Amino acid sequence: MFIATLIAKERLTRGDISAAADALGGVAGEQWIEDGHACDLQLIDSPTGARAALEGLLSDVDVVVQPAAHRRKRLLVADMDSTMITVECIDELADYAGLKAEVAEVTERAMRGELDFEAALDARVALLKGLDEAAIDRCRAERVRLAPGARALVRTMRANGAYALLVSGGFTRFAGPVAEEIGFDAQRSNILEVEAGRLTGTVARPIVGAAAKRESLLEAAASRAIPLDATLAVGDGANDIPMIEAAGLGVAYHAKPATAAAADARIEANDLTALLYAQGYARKDWVEA
């Protein structure tokens, strides 16, 4: 059986449910996850075309179409920058060197898939050569903020037996504290090299890029005997596409166009708690502390 979950930013009405059912040519049934906010529609036929029929049909409503089996995921692999946190750390760090606009332009192009990720990372980090190491901790304290719903998503999934891994093309000095604050089991990210208290302008090898993100998902699933159907990957950039395509449910979160096109679902209206509704967790089941 396949289900289409409608998740409203504000309120989901009976009229919205009827409009969605009509767009699908009828449904086998419906079940509210959260009254007035999130509802499952049971599909009569195969899911082919269901996502296209529903996305954009209702204002400020996200849609997740998926098999009912393995709905509650046992593995979460998540990107960090602009996904689990609200900023791109390298752009913010570059601001302390007076280079934010220059670096941010390259970041945007890399996230759109217009540039090779590793080469773009090397080029941006090279611009930071000589920056005082203390700027890293200052940047993290002053600029890094958790994305809405990040704690609830990770902690609810872990409380229900899932393993949560943060995999970032960003830097360990940010990803380590972020992973701990949110509640991830582990993190994998890049190491900014430092000598005598200043950035060298280099990144330690191997770089955590697109291939490494996919590899991290596959290795985490295999080592825990988790079928890929029971995995969830979420990210926003082109370097997230391989892991999104490999996951049982690959989600593009407020993502670049290429990433959204590659994903099984895209979240545009809601925060990260939409991924809890997609797994059938009502608000009363969320763990946020």
Image (tube, rainbow, N blue to C red):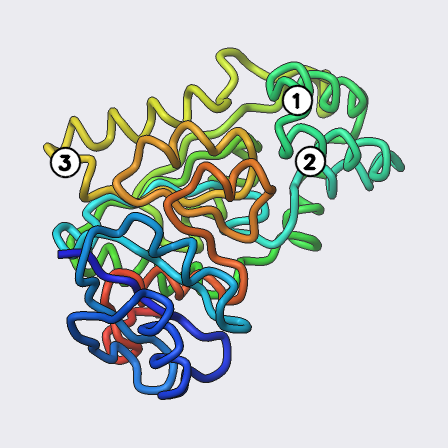
Q: Residue 279, how many percent across, how many down? A: 25, 61
User: Which residue is painted at 57% across and 33% down in the image?
Assistant: 170
Task: Evaluate if marks 2 and 1 touch, with contact meaning CB atoms under 8 Å apart.
Answer: yes
Q: Secondary structure at mark 3?
A: loop
What crowding class fits label 3: few (fewer than 14 Cα within 10 Å), some (14-19), or many (20 or more)?
some
In percent of width and height, residue 151 lies at 40, 61
The quarter holding residue 103 reads top right
Task: Pick whichever of labels 2 and 3 is earlier in the sequence.
Answer: 2
Q: Is residue 264 above or below residue 278?
A: above
x, y (%) of residue 121?
Answer: 66, 22
> Distance between the Cα atoms at labels 2 and 3?
34 Å
Measured as percent of width and height from the top left, residue 64 is found at: 35, 58
Q: Is residue 174 left or right of residue 286?
A: right
Q: Which residue is mark 1?
A: 121
Secondary structure of the residue carrying tag 1 is: helix
Compared to 46, does 208 lie above or below?
above
Q: Look at discs 1 and 3 and give the one toward the viewer.
A: 3
Mark number displayed over residue 227: 3
On the image, which quarter does residue 247 sit in? top left
Q: CA distance from mark 2 to mark 1?
A: 9 Å
Quadrant location, the N terminus: bottom left
In depth, the one of 40 and 201 nearer the eye is 40
Residue type at numbered disc 3? Pro
Kindly indicate the quadrant of the structure image that contains residue 185. top left
Identified by mark 2, the residue type is: Ile
